[in-house]
Amino acid sequence: MAPTRLVVLISGSGSNLQAIIDSCKNGEINAHIAAVISNKADAYGLERAKKAGIPTAVLSHKDFATREAYDEQLLHVIDSFEPNLVVLAGFMRILTGNLVQKYVGKMLNIHPSLLPKYQGLNTHQRAIDANDAFHGVSVHFVTEELDGGPVILQAKVAVLENDTAETLAARVHEQEHIIYPLVVKWFSEQRLSMEADYAVLDKKQLPAHGAHYP
Ligand code: GRF
């Protein structure tokens, strides 16, 4: 099977990008990262990509008057790398319907909460404030609803008594770096697809919360 072509979109540190780079390099995932695109020129993830010899592109949202205009150009740049799968890895932008529709079923996101809980920002603090016993992370297909597409895989993380948003986030990140490469691997093995409002793994419909890791 030909390696799956990935385009990874980032805005920041890119630790999830790194986990995927490593999994591609060590042969765990049969995929090739065709490009890393960032909306921020100073995103550290761009350095990670360069170190790994991956082409990079920066497209600043500040250079565009509207979200639509930005996304139109972003779509153009993504298309130019001909990806089979677009991986959002800390890409801090809300995407327009046009862009999402073009890659529906072929675009993944990772969100640091047990979706459908805590869509949006500040998820770690919100889990602490709510006295949740468990927090976690979800990988899901991207649809037009923000953090709302079919969930594929979740990992739970226990919330400890003295947790701060930072300590909790650090433990969630450890899980992110395991489950994101795993989902990309499933996709690249053609075991994963999206139906109307659920994900399918090995021909079986996944529940609304996705599969659980481990
Ligand atoms: C992660 O917490 C991810 O869940 C969220 O953005 C963060 C990206 O971190 N979507 P990194 O840039 O991969 O280190």
Image (cartoon, helix red, strand yellow):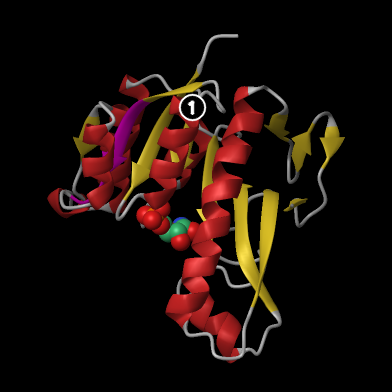
Q: Split into 4 quadrants, where in the image is the N terminus?
A: top right
**Residue at 28 percent of width and 36 percent of height:** 49
- Judge by depth and name the residue closer to the eye, 49 or 62: 49
- Judge by depth and name the residue closer to the eye, 202 or 47: 47
- In reply to whether residue 25 is colored magenta, the answer given is no
Where does residue 34 sit, x and y in percent of width and height?
35, 23
- In reply to whether residue 38 is colored magenta, the answer given is yes
Q: Is residue 46 left or right of residue 177?
A: left
SS type, badge 1: loop
Residue for badge 1: 26
Kind of residue at disc 1? Asn
Crowding near pointer 1: few (<14 within 10 Å), some, many (20+)? few
**Residue at 59 percent of width and 67 percent of height:** 113
Residue 155, above or below 205 = below
Q: What stretch of residues is rendered in magenta? A: 34-40
**Residue at 50 percent of width and 33 percent of height:** 23
